[in-house]
Image (cartoon, rainbow, N blue to C red):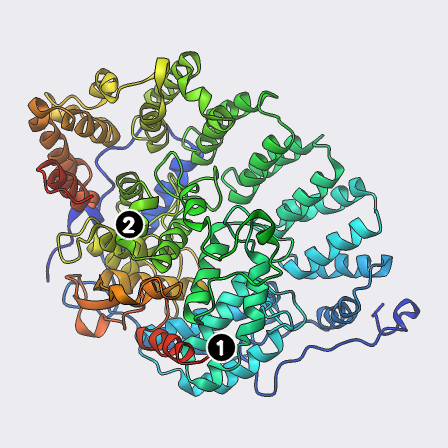
Amino acid sequence: MPQTPSQFTELPPIQDSLITKSSEVELATAKDCLPLLANPEGRLNSFGLPHLNRAGHITFLRSNLEDLLPRGFTAADASRPWMLYWALSGLSMLGDDVTDLRDQVVSTLTPMQNRDGGFGGGHGQLSHLATTYASVLSLVTVGGYAALNLINRKTLWHWLGHMKQGDGGFTMCEGGEKDIRGAYCAMTVISLLNLPNELPPEAPARADGVETFLAKLPEWISSCQTFEGGIAGAPTNEAHGAYAFCALACLSIIAPPNESIRRHIDIPALISWLAYRQCAPEGGFAGRTNKLVDGCYSHWVGGCWTLISAALQSEGSADIWSREGLTRYILCCCQGSAGLRDKPTTYPDGYHSCYVLAGLSAAQNVFKFEVDEKLLGVTPGTAAYGWTTVGQANVPGDEEDRIIPVHPVLVVPFERAAECRGYFESKIGF
Amino acid sequence: MSYSASPLWADIVPLPQDDGPGQPLAAIAYSEKYSEAMSYLRAVMASNEMSERALDLTSDIIALNPAHYTVWLYRVRILLTLKKDLHAELSWMNPVALVHLKNYQIWHHRQTIINALNNPDGETDFISKMFAKDAKNYHVWSYRQWLVKRFSLWDAGELEFTEQMLKEDVRNNSAWNHRWYVVFGRGDEAFADPDIVMREVFFTQQSIRLAPQNPSPWNYLRALARRASGPAALPLSSLQPFANTFAPLSAPDAVKSTHALDLLAEIHSENEADKDKAYQALELLATRYDPIRANYWNYRRATLEGVKTV
């Protein structure tokens, strides 16, 4: 069995002597991870890492969906569409067919769709962009016309028009906060559902001369890049991995990444910032400078690399990041007995299961962006459909540790994204 | 007492949760109390009721589930419509915020209230209590930025505050981000002010000396060099002697900071005659001091060799 490189079994060679709160928790985390990285236990693959516990993760996510969740989950009562999406998305990546859940997904989400067109976190809850995004993606992930037809596209288009702001950004809900999640969630939904780029006539942003969803949007995203090179949730906030993904993915929906990311992002500064998010000795990613490794950034930061490669048009050339490191962190440190987790000291949950697996998809696969120029610019969001997988990356995993590649921008199964977009493109009017 | 038994609520027909026609997914075993309160909430929201009892109902639900954005948004509308005492609202919500640190509805709510009050008194003290529990809380720092801008608190001890936070933990990157905001967030003029830029260079270099492997001040320093302009211009090459202290290329065993090596690689790449030094720094990073980023350092090397990728 190949020996584990020392960078994953020892602390980095340079350690400052000054101890602060940040360095204490960082050291503690490294000490929690090192034994799991150096001496993995259980059934090991041919690289000496634990196998992907596919059956265990499927059981965990199915239980998240189908069992009655205990009272402690009341805190998630405003996030039930998310619970659906995380589980369905995770199951799909694990190769578990979720079409048997289609009727239940439609039935569960029906009372959450409001008359104004958006989806709330539950019945009687206000429409919100995050829960609208999670609802739409859940329906797309189970697929089929019965699921897609649940969405009232015309009223949703009107509601989205109220989220668009005069400065180009989006608020998460009426009277809610404005941040880059709003932009990503809105553009993902607009792209999947093939909604018009024009704002509805009553949209408040029209008063500021903003007439389309795309107007001033790339510029607003650009203003979120910080002095560190990373991207914040809103201008001047701290650079953060989840927001970096939202920014790059949103730009990749607006136009081909080699145009939009190049034009609106300082790429060398961002690449440097992203590269520094990979943690040693753990191999996984942290979300901010001097914060701890966390499995969910496997996707939020790991997923950025696919989009950066497309922006540089360097797919297939040498990687800029360590796929090996991320794979080791995921297989050694993020797997509980069932479900995936932030780090060894935490419990698995749906959120981490989904985004750890999406990160594994980014580590295991080489994606390529190529789009028919004629299709671009016809309707917004066409650029999201230029992605294919062109091969498997060289990572320490066996065939049985491989998961089904997830769409690098839309984070739904490839064929489901195409099915949804194709279905709504074929419709005349709403 | 339950709502159904209360005479105050006798005129309301509760609206139970519709779980859809089939077996619901991700269903939660609510407590009876929560279930009932939510049924009354759906009913009063459906008629857009703005009343004392509706306000009390939102308090009850927030106590049971503070991560409920709908309740917070409804609550603030009631408060503003009924012209309630917003100071009382702050006193009510303070303990909620301190217990539920990661909840960001609370911070958005607080922002709306303080904005309506048009008075930030006491806010920075309250924020300090939050930071004592979680010094890197993203929502609290965002809120503090808003507060500074909204009430023009730029010179009201804000720079000293970042110094205090960094004195407690020089690796608190949120505090570094806030410092950048306080110093340069008012406009680009500060980038051309030699006094300001030199003060920041000095502060940053002092911080680096405390812990040379701390990335935060290095990021800050490099950004200063990138953005300082006019009479305050700070060429990257001027930082070479400082970086050398922590990463002498002539004594590779004595390297104390990968960030110094990174900076030296960039400085030396600007000059054709020094490119071999840039290669040396990148080589040390890739093979000896920072192998987790070996691919990145090799990518930097490739861009140096003229494989233009961007």
Mark 1 chain: A
**Label 2 to label 1, Cα distance in Å?**
51 Å
Measuring from the top left, give residue B25's x and y in whole percent. 53, 79
At 40% from the left and 32% from the top, the residue drawn is: B171
Identify the residue shown where x is 56% and y is 83%: A107
Nearest to the observer: residue A372 or residue B310: A372
The quarter holding residue B299 reads top left
**Viewer-proximal residue among A11 and A125:** A125
The answer to which of marks 2 and 1 sits earlier in the sequence is: 2
Count of picture labels: 2
Q: Is residue A154 visible?
A: yes
Label 2 Cα crowd, 10 Å radius (few <14 / some 14-19 / many 20+): many
SS for dot 2:
loop
Residue shown at 62%/66% (left/top)?
A: A74
> Which numbered disc, 2 or 1, marks the residue closer to the eye?
1
Q: Is residue B203 left or right of residue A198?
A: left
Please state the horizontal and vertical placement of residue A240, each as a whole percent of the image.
Answer: 41, 45
**Number of the label disc, if any, that sits on residue B223:** none
- The image shows residue B213, relative to residue A50, as above or below, that is above
Residue furthest to the right in view is B7
Q: Residues within 10 Å of mark 1 (few under 14, many from 20)?
A: few
Q: Is residue A351 left or right of residue B134?
A: left
Task: Tell me what residue is drawn at x 55 percent, y 44 percent.
Answer: B139
Q: Which residue is mark 2?
A: A282
- Amino acid carrying label 1: it is Gly
In x, y percent, where is residue A207?
A: 61, 50
Q: Is residue A174 above or below residue B31?
A: above
- Residue to which mark 1 is pinned: A429
Q: Quadrant of residue A232?
A: top left
Quadrant (top left/top right/bottom left/bottom right) for the C terminus of chain B? top left
Dot 2 and dot 1 residues touching (CB under 8 Å): no
Q: Is residue A218 left or right of residue A234?
A: left
